[in-house]
Image (tube, rainbow, N blue to C red):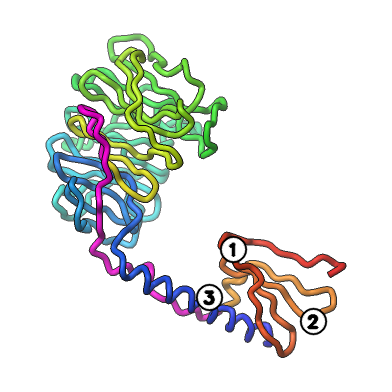
Amino acid sequence: MKIQKHFFLLFFFLGINLVFAVLVSAESTLGYYRYPALHGNTLFFAAEGDIWTADIQGGMARRLTTHPGEETHPAISPDGQTLAFSATYEGPTEVYTMPLNGGMPTRWTYEADSSIVVGFTPDGRLIYTTRAYSTLPNPQLVTIDLITNEKNLVPLSQASDGSYDASGQTLFFVRPGFHNNNTQRYKGGTAQNIWKFTASRPEAQNLTEDFSGENFSPMWWNGRVYYVCERDGIWNIWSMNEEGKDLRQHTQHQGWNVKSPSMDDGRIVYQLGADIRVLDVRNDQDQLIPISLASDFDQLREKWVKDPLDYLTSAHVHPAGDSVVLTSRGRVFVAPVGDGRLVRASFKEGMITTIGIPSSA
């Protein structure tokens, strides 16, 4: 019981820090923005597990979804009427659509495997990627006709992401799928490449085989393919012609990687750190979109702990038996077995999961 009493004191100490963090955060309306998509001057993105919308110039965003499940990867149909996204409403990540200005979501997939929205074909078919049909743990592109509900597999092995040209006959796709390795400057055997496949041709063509690093997120526009590449050591936006030649670098970021780019009529919105930026490829102007969230920040509310021992990560008794060292929520504390003072032993922030005391201590 003495240890449990010390553990309650530990949570009181942590609670002071938590309340302070809540008070500081309450003064700010900045969020962590991901998966941007653009239609005209309207921006869509994911934050706090929901889909939001804002003007391309920035300002206060409006929340479009409120379900406790997480929504990600928004994409807008070519006619500007439908918003597609992936969500965990019924458990697995499946594909949903809703009217662009809000409304009841409609579920389109029942794959029981993660189904991630990729975008739309020029004629309005929704594209997503899943491993449900591949018989191997490899992703494959699938299209859905939102009028007839007809599904068609794109006959390309390991195609995990892609973008069609204006004719809808040529697909620029990524192969293989993401390897779940975030190592910077990775050049292993599963590094992604961008390929080109035209329906009238017998086989696909590797457009980025001259570079052994990562190449992904292809976006076709006006005769060029824009994509993310780390030829300069950081994920930046590059472009090439339809034959993989005439390379150009459009962003020069250092430190943070470009993530989740999406193009609409010559403008690319993308995530950089916790922010969203827009690149106009017609003049290579790149700028931050200053977004604010009108939110109650429910995830930052104080939470009452009924059983503090549920949050105990690790514990180790001193060889002399007079104290115990505990880890909880990434912090280390030393508590006496009897009466005494609870002491925090670690002050540098960071995740600590296991601890121990040398037998000679």
Secondary structure, mark 2, is loop
Where is residue 346, by image quadrant?
A: bottom right
Task: Check disc 1 and give the amino acid type.
Answer: Lys
Q: CA distance from mark 2 to mark 1?
A: 26 Å
Query: Looking at the image, which is closer to me, 58 or 283?
Result: 283
Query: Which portion, as a residue range, is magenta?
Result: 278-307
The magenta stretch spans residue 316: no
Q: CA distance from mark 3 to mark 2?
A: 24 Å
Name which residue lies at 58% across and 83% down: 9
Query: Looking at the image, which is closer to me, 24 or 199?
Result: 24
Where is residue 257, by image quadrant?
A: top left
Q: Which residue is mark 2?
A: 322
Q: Decide: few, some or many residues near mark 3? Use Cα within 10 Å; few <14, some 14-19, many ≥20.
A: some
Q: Which residue is mark 3?
A: 14
Looking at the image, is mark 2 or mark 1 nearer the viewer? 1
Locate the C terminus by quadrant.
bottom right
Which callout, 2 or 1, points at the residue further toward the start of the chain?
Answer: 2
Task: Check disc 3 and give the amino acid type.
Answer: Leu
Name which residue lies at 85% across and 67% down: 359
